[in-house]
Amino acid sequence: PMNDLLTIAPLLSVGLTAVAVLLSDAITPNRKYAPISVALAGLGVTAWILLQQSGGVATALNGAYVGGPFVAYLGLLGAAIVAITLLISPDHLFARGYPSAEFAATLLFALCGTILLAAAADLVTLFIALELMVIPGYLLAGFAKRDPLSTEGAVKYFLLGSFSSAILLFGIVVLWGVAGTASLSGIATALLSGEANAGLAVALALITTGSAFKIAAVPFHYWTPDAYQGSPTPITGYLSVGPKVGAFVLLIKLFVIALAPLAALWIPVMVVLAAATMTLGNLVALTQSNVKRMLAYSSIAHTGYLMVGIVAAGAGEAAGIAGVLFYAAAYAFMNLGAFAFLTALQGRPGATTQLSDLAGLGRKHPRMAILAAIFLLSLTGIPPTAGFFAKPYVILAAVQAGGPATILAVIAVLN
């Protein structure tokens, strides 16, 4: 049991930090920055623990939790996303009278889900981790409870999120029944030896649909623009990267690991989804007049690019997963940067996020305009930004994988 506790220490550290944040607020209710300071200190401790664990692989809880470099990488990325969100949000929250302790604690609970998702080695842990990650997201989307747009976005997000979770769970249950085991590696072994049957086809269809909702792939993307536009801007920044990185971990675990023997069946579906997602995301973004909606559609397009890496990994190209992980990190920082800039621009209550509000920014706030330009160039993929280096990673992996992945690489380049 002691070894188990040491292995799941990052998870415990984040959970205890969330409790400490709520306690600090109860003890000193008038100190607005105290909860955020406690949260950042706890994230520092968690990051240190994750770095200590990044060397070797250790299992806990009878093999349901597997710690190691993968968990360390995603845990550090998740902690960085939460830390940046906490740093950019106080002025926005305080100007509008939103509580900071609940905000920090909710983000930390979502981070627990991300770490558990990265470490999950069986279907049950995977699903619990996914819910632990997305349910705080519903709360955050409706954080501005007096704003009708925020409530509308949160309700859409919650209803569609619940539906997709149910669909995914049905798929997981059927897959478990067909394979006779809940272990991800065990499922892959069982599928290698068994022959394909109707149950497997149903499981594959349900899991693909549920996962596509979670990553907001077209045509399951309708909740994204509303949830993003309605949420307070720093929260939109978090929602656009935190849950998305977690959802791609889910895809890696379910498709690239558990359903690897069925790659020939799911790769064509993923190719179509990815092509539709990146193309529609980019085309619809062109017509938006609201910056947050435009960035929401841009994040849908980036989902399409990330799926290129998943397809390459499914086709047996190991560089695919590395590409997805690197792209996720680059995308997280450039998108958070874009939303940090929007948050700063919206310093006063009543400021909108229409494109027309950005007119003349270079004259009024030259430094902010330069930073905004860098983040947007990175999102476009212009060298020498991180966004540029991320794209060749996934596209080259797809080209090396060959077959349908090559067609997808061409569509990605055109986009």
Image (cartoon, helix red, strand yellow):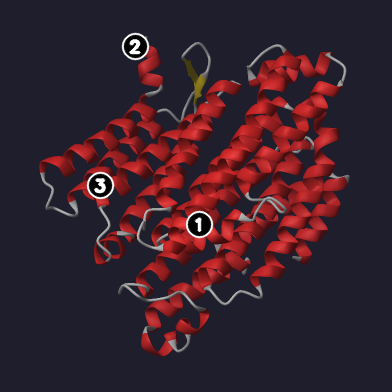
Q: Is residue 26 above or below residue 354?
A: above
CA separation in Å, label 3 and label 2: 31 Å
Of residue 412 and residue 232, the one placed in the foreground of this image is 232
Amino acid on which the number 2 mark rests in the picture? Met
State which quadrant residue 94 falls in: bottom left
Q: Is residue 98 above or below residue 6?
A: below
Numbered badge on residue 2 = 2
Amino acid on which the number 3 mark rests in the picture? Ala
Q: Position of residue 268 (x, y in %)?
A: 84, 43
State which quadrant residue 224 falls in: bottom right
Of labels 3 and 2, earlier in sequence is 2
CA separation in Å, label 2 and label 1: 44 Å
Residue at (53, 74) in percent of width and height:
290
Q: Can you identify the residue that label 3 sits on?
A: 101
Q: Is residue 238 left or right of residue 398?
A: left
Q: Can you identify the residue that label 1 sits on?
A: 153
Secondary structure beneath dot 3 equals: helix
Residue at (40, 61) in percent of width and height:
232
User: Quick check: can you spot residue 53?
Assistant: yes
Q: Position of residue 87 (x, y in %)?
A: 31, 57
Of labels 1 and 3, earlier in sequence is 3
Name the front one of labels 1 and 3: 1
Of labels 2 and 1, earlier in sequence is 2
Locate the N terminus by quadrant.
Answer: top left
